[in-house]
Amino acid sequence: MATGLFVGLITLDCIYRVSHVPSSDEKLVAEDSLLVAGGPATNAAIAFACLGNRAIVMGALGQHPLAATIRAELASYGVEVVDLMPELVTPPPLSTILVTASTGDRAIVSRNAVGRQAEPPDALENALRNADMLLIDGHQMAAGLAAATLAQRQSVPVVIDAGSWKPGFEAVLRRATSAIAAAKFQIPGQADTLAALASLGVPEVAITHGSQPLQYCYQQQVGMLPVPQVTVQDTLGAGDIFHGAFCHYRLQAPFTAALGNAAQVAAQSCQHFGPRAWINEVTEQPGF
């Protein structure tokens, strides 16, 4: 059993499946709804745990009653929590997500980690002591940078979930082993994201493009990797699940093979409503 530390955002996601995104002043009854823990690092940690590993998520959670809902779900998947701001009494960040039933596209409104930026905890060294993998999503930049610096000293692989640019990312990226970016991710002033990430010294770089082939740069070789084509029900969390699965597979396979396996898991997740329904289907299949 491998151990992964996931540093970043912890939210409570209110997810609605709708026929369309409502217009101004329109009322709409959802076809379905879910209330689950969310955030890139959190969803990745759950995926990593469900693929047979020990997962620890480090983020700002606090002691509001809604935080107990998040803790309970994480515990049900065996995910441990290191709380960066345990004294907080305000509600955890709430994300409202509308998933369009016909396309699986999602629209999201969230506060993310605004007002919840924390300093590196005293527990960081202990959390990393037995870690085999570290993932950082950039939503807790100070803690992420401290974790990446310590992990680099201890030769622990550092994976970056580059969903969108955040101030301070350049320092974290210079300590990365692998950086997997969304298609919309862009380093300020750099038109070619793949080349820019490689120029920062990141040995393994990939850019996902949804259902289109992903790009990668590995050992100075640039290539494209096809991804599974599936009937999409919901794309919410697919990128996060990709990252968690990549962390799992990269510990046992070369970079491109790990990307391919992670893409299979993410594609499975897109065939279900919500970010958890894929779990039983994937973990029961041979090879996962």
Image (cartoon, grey):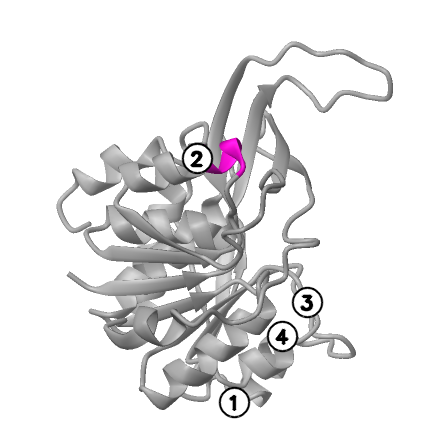
Mark 2 or mark 3, which is nearer the start of the sequence?
2
Counting residues from the start of the chain, the first of labels 3 and 1 encountered is 3
Query: On the picture, is 208 further left or further right than 151?
Result: right
Spatial CA distance of label 3 from label 2 is: 29 Å
Q: Residue at x 33, y 57 (%)?
A: 56
Which amino acid does the dot numbered 2 rest on?
A: Ala
Q: Would you say residue 250 is visible in this rendering? A: yes
Q: Amino acid at mark 1?
A: Gly
Q: Is label 3 or label 2 in front?
A: 2
Describe the element under mark 4 as helix, strand or loop. helix
- Quarter of the image where the N terminus is located: bottom left
Residue depth check, mark 2 versus mark 1: number of the one nearer the observer: 2
**Number of residues whose C-alpha sits closer than 10 Å to that of mark 2, classed few (under 14), some (14–19) or many (20 or more):** few
Magenta stretch in the rendered image: 64-68
User: Would you say residue 95 sits in the magenta stretch?
Assistant: no
Instruction: Find the distance from the CA under tag 4 to the CA under tag 3.
Output: 6 Å
Can you identify the residue that label 2 sits on? 68
The local secondary structure at tag 1 comes to loop
Q: Nearer the viewer, residue 225 or 75?
A: 75
Q: Residue 111 got which mark?
A: none
Question: What residue would you read off at disc 1?
Answer: 201
Q: Position of residue 72 (x, y in %)?
A: 36, 35
Instruction: Indicate which disc, 2 or 1, sits on the residue closer to the N terminus.
Output: 2
Residues packed near mark 1 inside 10 Å, few (<14), some (14 to 19) or many (20 plus): some
Residue at image position (86%, 21%) is 24
- For disc 3, the marked residue is 166
Q: Which one is in front in this view, the residue at disc 4 or the one at disc 1?
A: 4
In the image, 149: left or right of 74?
right
* Residue receiving disc 4: 169
